[in-house]
Amino acid sequence: MAIPLPAPLSPSSFGQDLARGLRGRPKQIAPKYFYDDAGSALFDEICGLSEYYLTRAELSILRDRAAALVSRVGAGARVVELGSGSGAKTRPLLDALDKPAEYLAVDVSAGALAAATSALREAYPAVRVVSVLADFTSAFALPAASSRARETLVYFPGSTIGNLTPSEAVDLLHRVRAACGRCAMVLGVDLKKAPARLHAAYNDAAGVTAAFNKNLLVRANRELGTNFDVDAFAHYAFYAPGPGRIEMHLASLKRQRVELDREGFVFEQGETILTEYSYKYTAPEMERLASRGGFRVVSWYTDSAADFAVASLESV
Ligand code: AVJ
């Protein structure tokens, strides 16, 4: 598993991806660009909102079921967390494992990585904690495991798998499997439920999700010198029952022309830029997805309301 590291996200990749996304129809940008320091802080705030049940539900499942979720993983394992964020959900897993040797946090947010890994280093002095500033949605690569790590457990928390389309999710599972051979995975999955509850979770009354969404434009104006009129964009998020996903957009409230590297992009009044998909799954749908990705669902636990599931998967 000694593969070169992908380049961390640079301003130029943001600029190039944004230009490509604005040339497309519909206009779009990948959700990984939400997570600069301000965006990571807004996401942490979202996790505490009453409407946003996902984080609390996942934590409660981990607290109750961590031992069962990692029961097939032996002593001295290496844990790789994809999209580790604040690292709040990592502890129950590390606590349930028998003498974990290493913990690799993979994230696109440098600030979140530094804070999460320094807190974990302090709390788990016996674990070798490594931060990997990387985008796991493209070329997947990890530093070699140290000789003391025996097997790899990949933790993919937060229903981040829902930010990928099903075919992108299948690709990611294949890449994970190729990277760690026989490999165990713990996967957080948001479940299909009443559309009104899903709608509320992405349209909170305090407007934090709206600020998180609009921060993308604030970031582009600061880092790329674009001239988005941020106040003339509205947060627009809705659940689409057909594909089974939340779609998050930013809708221009007026006709405006945005400049990026001397290229002009016109937004008609009401035109949107797609910023995120968040797919929701049922248990059978996730079983099918896992099997298309070369994994089998070994166990599946939900919170008491059956809002969220944490699954353990094994490569086949
Ligand atoms: C990063 C996958 C946990 O899709 O729910 C929260 C991000 N977007 N509110 C999700 C998000 C809007 C989020 N995850």
Image (cartoon, rainbow, N blue to C red):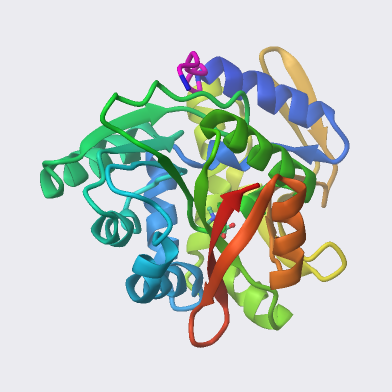
| In the depicted structure, whether residue 69 falls above or below residue 90 | below
Q: Give the range drawn in magenta.
A: 2-9
**At 28% from the left edge and 48% from the top edge, which residue is drawn?**
75
Residue 202 seen in render: yes
Query: x%, y% of residue 182?
Result: 54, 39
Query: x%, y% of residue 106?
Result: 42, 35
Q: In this view, does 25 lie to the left or right of 142?
A: right
Q: Which of 289 and 137 is in front in this view?
A: 289
Q: In which quarter of the image is residue 95?
A: bottom left
Give ligand 1's quarter of the image: bottom right
Q: Quadrant of residue 13?
A: top right
Q: Is residue 305 left or right of residue 227?
A: left
Which secondary structure type mostly characterizes the magenta part of the structure?
loop
**At 42% from the left edge and 53% from the top edge, which residue is drawn?**
42
Magenta stretch: includes residue 3? yes
Residue 254 seen in render: no
Q: In this view, does 24 lie to the left or right of 308?
A: right
Q: Which of 233 and 194 is in front in this view?
A: 194
Query: x%, y% of residue 37?
Result: 37, 39
Query: x%, y% of residue 29?
Result: 69, 37
Magenta stretch: includes residue 13? no
**At 29% from the left edge and 55% from the top edge, which residue is drawn?**
97
| In the depicted structure, whether residue 219 falls above or below residue 165 | above
Q: Nearer the viewer, residue 233 or 313?
A: 313
How many numbered marks have been drawn onto this rendered protein structure? 0
Q: Which of 196 and 194 is in front in this view?
A: 194
